[in-house]
Image (cartoon, helix red, strand yellow):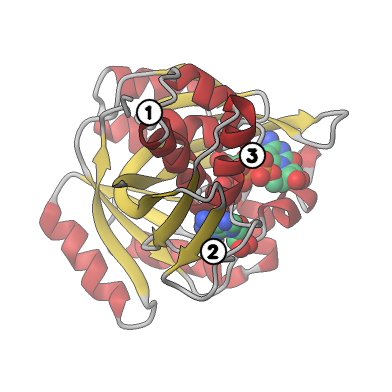
Amino acid sequence: MHLIEKAPAKINLTLDVLGKRDDGYHEVEMIMTTVDLADRIHLTLRDDGRISVDVDKGFVPGNEQNLAYQAAKLLKTEFGVKAGVHIFIEKNIPVSAGLAGGSTDAAATLRGLNRLWRLGTTIDKLAELGAEIGSDVPFCVYGGTAIARGRGEKLEHIPSPPPCWVVLVKPPMGASTKDIYGKLDLDHLKHPDTAAVVKAIREKNFRGICEGLGNAMEDATFGLYPEVKSLKERVRSFGAEGVLMSGSGPTVYALLQNQSRADRIYNGLKGFVSQVFVVRLLGAKHHL
Ligand SMILES: C[C@](O)(CO)[C@H](O)COP(=O)(O)OP(=O)(O)OC[C@H]1O[C@@H](n2ccc(N)nc2=O)[C@H](O)[C@@H]1O
Ligand SMILES: Nc1ncnc2c1ncn2[C@@H]1O[C@H](COP(=O)(O)OP(=O)(O)OP(=O)(O)O)[C@@H](O)[C@H]1O
């Protein structure tokens, strides 16, 4: 038996860091939404009970360090599953990019194995288990648009922004989420106005959303990689309505209502950044 589950990337419309917690994580408040740039997770039943993983690109671990492997192991233990699975990942989302590539693969593996192994569990249970794998996994289990709090696992689902185009620009370096959190200057962060952006989303006010975009992690990533700051300025100079770094970076994105403007930015940047994508926001949540 074989099935394929789509694993879309996320972007942060806002990302606020409220402080450091005793467990070493940071308390966050952020609006996340899924975009139509996705990995494809192929799940094939194994009768010998083993879990194996293979990726079509060399720079992602094809072993137990892969978050999709960890998702399968967790489900197998939790539900006492005798069967195994071979996981093949078609990797389209740039790695270490701030787009939750590993987290969404884990989340898609949870959804897909619920079907393949006929577990009959709920999406809420999958999200709860996903939090053991990573802070972004619960959001990726549901997709859609949500405010995430706590260390990222406490979700409040909200309506999606109005349809628009997203240009994703991934510069050649990767950013380690752990390192960027470690470099935050907590007393001098630029805090976005999350409530204002939520209001703009509810009112389908595209301009309001663009004006409110904000990411408290930008300065830490810009400090480490000044080229990312220059890239953001360059994207803005092409006439994008809203521009922001996603997650801990280094991917920078622009939101546009007009496809020809999105194409213009794509064409302008393609010459000197190899990973540029023009995609749509993905409104709908996942269902089991
Ligand atoms: C930057 C974001 O992608 C924004 O969506 C997330 O906050 C990061 O989520 P993630 O990659 O799923 O993070 P995890 O795998 O849970 O944690 C990686 C590392 O990031 C740091 N971390 C993560 C989340 C959080 N709220 N506070 C943290 O300090 C911790 O040092 C942790 O060891
Ligand atoms: N299935 C996977 N896909 C991509 N990376 C993975 C996967 N499993 C484990 N990893 C490891 O996770 C690390 C982070 O990769 P990932 O692409 O998830 O980062 P990211 O997009 O910055 O995530 P986030 O936005 O959640 O911080 C990489 O070092 C990679 O080796």
> Which residue in the protein does label 1 denote?
145
In this picture, is 221 found above or below 173?
Answer: above
3D distance between C-alphas at marks 2 and 1: 26 Å
Question: Residue 157 at x, y = what percent?
Answer: 41, 18
Q: Nearer the viewer, mark 2 or mark 1?
A: 1
Can residue 80 be spotted in the picture?
A: yes
Question: Residue 212 at x, y = what percent?
Answer: 43, 34
Q: Earlier in the sequence, mark 2 or mark 1?
A: 1
> Which residue in the protein does label 3 denote?
133
**Within-10-Å neighbours for mark 3: few <14, some 14–19, many 20+:** some
Q: Earlier in the sequence, mark 1 or mark 3?
A: 3
Whether disc 3's CB lies below 8 Å from ligand 1 is answered yes
Whether disc 2's CB lies below 8 Å from ligand 1 is answered no
Q: Name the residue: 45% across, 73% down.
A: 57
Circle 1: element type: strand
The number of numbered badges drawn on the structure is 3
